Amino acid sequence: MTTNAQSKLAARYGAHDIAPLDAWNETLDQLLDHRSVRSFTDQPLPEGTLETLVAAAQSASTSSNLQVWSVVAVQDAGRKKRLSELAGNQAYIHQAPLFLVWLADLSRVSRIAEQQGVELEALPYLESLLLGTIDAALAAQNAVVALESLGLGSVYIGGIRNDIEGVARELGLPAQVYPVFGLCVGYPSTERPAKVKPRLPQQAVLHHETYTTAGEEQVLSEYDARLGAFYQREGMKASGWSEQVVSRLRNVSSLHGREALLGELARMGFGLR
Amino acid sequence: MTTNAQSKLAARYGAHDIAPLDAWNETLDQLLDHRSVRSFTDQPLPEGTLETLVAAAQSASTSSNLQVWSVVAVQDAGRKKRLSELAGNQAYIHQAPLFLVWLADLSRVSRIAEQQGVELEALPYLESLLLGTIDAALAAQNAVVALESLGLGSVYIGGIRNDIEGVARELGLPAQVYPVFGLCVGYPSTERPAKVKPRLPQQAVLHHETYTTAGEEQVLSEYDARLGAFYQREGMKASGWSEQVVSRLRNVSSLHGREALLGELARMGFGLR
């Protein structure tokens, strides 16, 4: 097991940074091995797969058991195509047999309160947006672990936030529900296998007791080199991470509509105080 | 495997709702078996555990590889105690050998841009808060799956948002960083074993093609009964879910300070446009 663990850790960091644990196991293998899949075969999912992924998702923690999330499973070709257009024309959205739209959902608790004739004073706050967003993210990540254990692959689609009102119309979402992200699910195509992408050295993200930026410049320039080397091995344009990050966040135009989220959420019934 | 799968699914829903997949596996067993652990032994974590959990966390997806999250590992008894007080006096925070504070971290990309003399125009938007929050949540959930595979237990601490400025002072957080939640990590005490809590029936959270509330009232009243029965079996006060949800969100006082998040985040350097 240890050799395998070493190779998984080396791929994840693009370097031999970390010694594997004695108690290493297959679940850790699988987690370390994650890669986003953007090319799927047309093999359909076995019956019951969706329900299994949702059971895994519902097994994640949820703040105070409020369960303020929902998910829409989209399999209809026309709807996948329209969602793909709303989310920046990513071809894999309609290629994948299953497209899951994960929702922060405060409408269910609101309907319950309405039936009881009670006002939920704690709801119209930014905190509720975070509650729903976090609940949805924890659930979705459990589904990702589950689907990878079944040999499936996936990719998150943040582009679903480019036009949340458009997505809400397409999916018939009630007020106080917003689509947090999408997730394409299917069998990975073997023609264009995805690779494990090296992440930042642990020193950059893991702090002990208090936050520190000591030594950060050197760690980041090391990562720039590692990521550049990874892209070169893959035959892609070899730019470092620092360059990518800055070019990604430099202009508002890169938000592709997400600069309007605040106003859209307000119109969709979120209090956001 | 199938008998086991059936019992896991029955525990998760408090009923025999869902037929297990033929391809059921041990990862699904583990995911379904999740429960929040609020009582820990004093057994220390094996060396290298923290680094393994962070490697699993970093293996989760991150929007555009921006990696806008960080984590502070707290093991100092005094600091755990002070954080426990800031987060609503939950004893398990200082009982657990390891307390992880997960951060949405836009400061790292900001430091890079500053060094390059570039302004990140796309940063001061609500979208950035969501990016960091989602990145942190996906990472943390991977860590939870990893730690459970190692026989450890954990509980998320949303109370860390009760006073994010206080937590930021305690951890020395720079501007544009906020604590999303905490996570207590340790070996579960066998004296008070946690139980799997039944979740909403799938019909309540899983929608096909479009969102629907048809049949919701009946599904929710079924869940009220199932959850009530669970609490009764556990010798706890047996109230249904609808009642709990409404009583949890009825008054602003239940937010314990989180009603001030918007202003606090603004003071902490988040743009939130």
Image (cartoon, coloured by chain):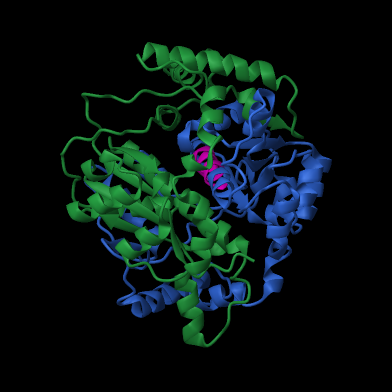
Chain colours: A blue, B green
**Left or right: A181, with A90 as reference point:** left
Is residue B266 a member of the stretch shown in magenta?
no
Residue A105 vs B129, above or below: the answer is above
The residue shown at (56%, 40%) is A152
Query: Horizontal and vertical percent for residue B112?
Result: 47, 79
The residue shown at (36%, 43%) is B146
The residue shown at (30%, 52%) is B83
Query: Horizontal and vertical percent for residue A199?
Result: 43, 63
Residue B230 occupies which quadrant of the picture? Answer: top left
Query: Is residue A9 visible in the rendered structure shown here?
Result: yes
Q: Main secondary structure of the magenta part?
A: helix
Residue sitting at the far right: A78
**Left or right: A111, with B96 as reference point:** right
Residue A264 vs A96, above or below: the answer is below
Query: Is residue A46 visible in the rendered structure shown here?
Result: no
Query: Horizontal and vertical percent for residue B15?
Result: 52, 13
Residue B150 occupies which quadrant of the picture? Answer: top left
Number of callouts: 0
Residue sitting at the far left: B43
Residue sitting at the far bottom: B117
Q: Nearer the viewer, residue B105 or A115?
A: A115
**Left or right: A271, with A169 as reference point:** left
Residue A246 vs A109, above or below: the answer is below
Q: Nearer the viewer, residue A176 or B248?
A: B248
**Left or right: A259, with B43 as reference point:** right
Q: Quadrant of the N terminus of chain A?
A: top left
Residue span colored magenta: A133-143
Query: Horizontal and vertical percent for residue A270?
Result: 67, 48
Is residue A139 a member of the stretch shown in magenta?
yes
